[in-house]
Amino acid sequence: MTFVLYRAIDHDGNLVDSLLSKTRDMEAAKRFFRQAVAVVGHAPDSVTTDGHASYPRAVRETMGGHIQHRTNKYLNNRLEQDHRGVKQRYYPMHGFG
């Protein structure tokens, strides 16, 4: 069984909220966006997602039509890049095994 991990980060790259879901559909996206807005206390100015078909409608219905919604799978991976420092230290050690 596959699970989907939703994560919200702020402008500084700090984790705001996360949700583990069995499905990647409209209801899961709406639930995640409502939960993330509740944690922060307000809707963001812009949202960047990977372009899944359910996200534009879920953003519009949960946060309003004034939110700038960008779809780019490369802009939303700031959280994925936070482990670069560890990798720079780890890779040179491969030869000492």
Image (cartoon, helix red, strand yellow):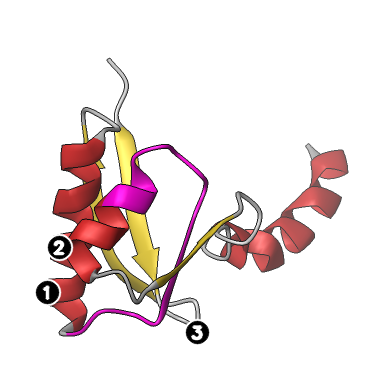
Q: Secondary structure at mark 1?
A: helix
Percent coordinates x, y for residue 46 in the rendering: 44, 75
Mark 1 → mark 3, Cα distance in angstroms: 19 Å
Q: Secondary structure at mark 2?
A: helix
Res. 38 mark: 1
Judging by the rendered image, the residue that carries numbered circle 3 is: 12
Residue flagged by tag 3: what amino acid is it?
Asp
In the figure, is residue 1 to the left or right of 34?
Answer: right
Query: Residue 10, relative to residue 52: is it above or below?
Result: below
Mark 1 → mark 2, Cα distance in angstroms: 6 Å
Q: Tell me which residue sits at (30%, 49%) in the image.
A: 57
Q: Is residue 53 magenta?
A: yes
User: What is the crowding at mark 1: few (fewer than 14 residues within 10 Å), some, or many (at least 20)?
Assistant: few
Of labels 1 and 3, earlier in sequence is 3
42 and 40: which is toward the camera: 42
Q: Secondary structure at mark 3?
A: loop
Where, quadrant-wise, is the N terminus in this rendering? top left
